[in-house]
Image: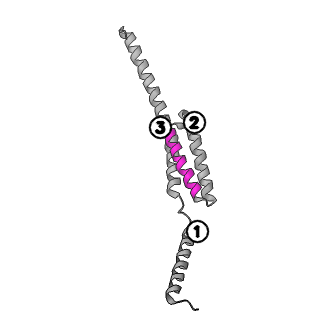
Amino acid sequence: MHPSIAQLQRILQASALGIVLALTACASTPPPTAELSAAQQAVSRAADADADQYASADIERARALLAQAQSAMAAGNQRDARTAAVAAAAAADLARARSREAVANTELAQRRAQVSRLREQLGMDR
């Protein structure tokens, strides 16, 4: 028996669908250049906020994750590069926030000490 035209069309459609699915599965994800750039900028902002002094563990983690992202990118592993870059940016943002908190707490302690000295000089009790 010879297949009918309708059967051939269904076979061709199924084959085309299979080819499209196979090509889609093989397609690589776009390189995470935006994520890497954002991570680099976040690490720079943290360093500018004195995170090396006030949040050294956090900024070191951010730098390590950024290096991991760059290595994954160089190896062609886009998914791991993206994941590490996003984690690096988050760690750098945390380092920056903790550094800013430490600076604010230091300034607050200095202001309280000034107020205390002024109270003593004026003979005021708390």
Which of pointers 2 and 1 lies earlier in the amino acid sequence?
1
Front: mark 2 or 1:
1
Secondary structure under tag 1 reads: helix
Please give the range of residues in magenta.
79-95
Q: Quadrant of the C terminus?
A: top left
Tell which of 106 and 17 is nearer to you. Answer: 17
* The quadrant where residue 57 appears: top right
- How much space separates mark 2 and mark 1, taking CA atoms? 41 Å
- How much space separates mark 2 and mark 3, taking CA atoms? 12 Å
Tell which of 123 and 4 is nearer to you. Answer: 4
Q: Is residue 115 left or right of residue 82?
A: left
Amino acid of disc 2: Ser
Q: Which residue is under mark 2? A: 56
Q: Which residue is under mark 3? A: 97
**Colour scheme of the rendered structure:** one colour
Q: Which residue is under mark 1? A: 26
Secondary structure under tag 2 reads: helix
Secondary structure under tag 3 reads: helix
Tell which of 78 and 93 is nearer to you. Answer: 78
